[in-house]
Image (cartoon, helix red, strand yellow):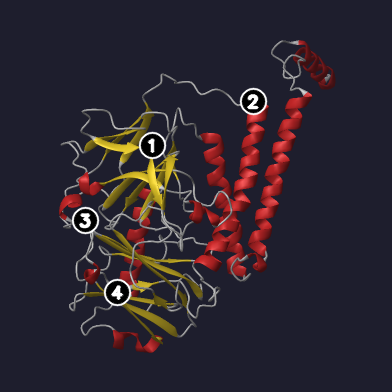
Amino acid sequence: MNYARIALIVLAIAVTSPLGCGSNDREASSEAKESLERGWAAFIEGLEEARGEIEDPWLAGPDPSERNLADGYRYLLGHAVRIAETEFGQHADLPYFQRSVRMMSKWTIDNPDTLYLSAPIDPAGTYRIRARAADSQDWHTSKRTRIYPKAPRLVTFQTTTATIGDTGELNEFATCRNQTLGFVQGFEIFPDHDGRFEILVAPSKPDNYRGHFLPTRGSVECAPRDKEPFMLEREATNIAVREIFSNWDTEVPMDLEIERIDTHTNIRPSLNAEETAQRFEAIGAKLPNQIRFWNALHEFGLEVLGDRNLDGKRALPENALNPAAPPFIAGGTAGARQLYSAGTFNLDDDQALILRVETKVDPHYVGFQLANFWGESLDQASYTSSLTGGQLPRQRDGARYYVVTARDPGVPGWLDPTGLPEGAMSMRFVYNEDPAEKDFPVITSTLTTFDQIREHFPEGTATVSPEKRRTQIARRQAHIRKRWRQY
């Protein structure tokens, strides 16, 4: 059989057929091809620029050790995946909740106890969020009941004005670009007997509406450092959702959906060449901007590697946590009823950092987390690199004890740095009512040697055997498989 002749016949039919890929009326125009080539070139240029910001320590990134570079390349890819889904997958007329943080795309010194979700919105539009949660009575009592399964320990819905870091400049803080216009928390949500509730999202609250509401337009106060506060009119372009888990064994994610209800659009138009090119250009611009922004914030805003403004202290102290206070970079996004404490660790193999945390009023949620200097939380599934209040109860003296050290010391409260000699530490405290300043947590830091760890823990502290630690890890992995599943 003459296969070459048959191939030529098939090719001829394809070229002359109205359905053929090569027909003249279906071939992309030179203008379309030029648009796509322009967009692709901008995307590749952005990738290369971002790679340079990962590799060059003069661009405010972490020291270029093998581990830091390996983490950094993955960190770059994580930003690319997240931005690409937003640019190509999302549409404000037909939104859906996507993961803002994934296991491979972590950023913002994320909380490993949290499921971060987001959806784009048109500030002129009206949307309805439908949710269903497991047993949620603990939202209102802050107790730890034994009814299972349970809703996440805390949930927060917010309308936000912009994605932090897209400009690549720390001046975002001075212009108050990333702000929250409104938020609804689990403390004020009372689901029905099936665990269902709804939230209306719109430019203004309708007359006689009594349900949960989030505004997409509003006035916000902008208070840059060393300047007089002023008011700004802002529009929200995004819905942000946080589901925070404390008891990883019993708390399960909510079912969520969002729908635009002021239009009847149910078909998303296909992208033409120019629109596709513009999205590739946007990815190419935002990707290096994100790397640049967070490098600069960690280096100069948080001073994770040293005193950069020469005032004799570091914003994030080394081998210590600063006093708990409202988060200064949240822009309203995460500050409601929350206190934040952060620092860095820098430890030799035989050193240990012990942190005693006394809370006069026990928070509704408390969590301690480790991160690398790219701002990624460490692997929370295979390591005890984070601990919640549910995972680490208070000791007999009313305090919680944590220890950061390279090897397992056999005590509760071990935070495993996963082989990193240095990194970031953060603590989050969320209350069902704003605490008085006199009731803020008190944190004491002690640097010691590995063999002296138990001397700094209360008498009678339990021993965690290797077998118990393996069981602990298995339980963590089981929860992460459920929370991060992709179906």
Where residue 19 sits, quadrant-wise, is top right
Earlier-in-chain disc, 2 versus 4: 2
- Secondary structure, mark 4, is loop
Query: In the rendered image of this protein, does residue 48 appear above or below residue 396?
Result: above
Check disc 3 and report the residue beneath it.
432
Residues packed near mark 4 inside 10 Å, few (<14), some (14 to 19) or many (20 plus):
many
Left or right relative to 308: residue 362: left
Placement of the N terminus among the 4 image quadrants: top right
Query: Quick check: can you spot residue 1?
Result: no
Check disc 4 and report the residue beneath it.
412
Determine the CA span between mark 1 and mark 4. Answer: 45 Å
Determine the CA span between mark 4 and mark 3. Answer: 27 Å
Check disc 1 and report the residue beneath it.
216
Earlier-in-chain disc, 2 versus 1: 1
Residue at x 59%, y 54% (from the top left corner): 76
- Secondary structure, mark 1, is loop
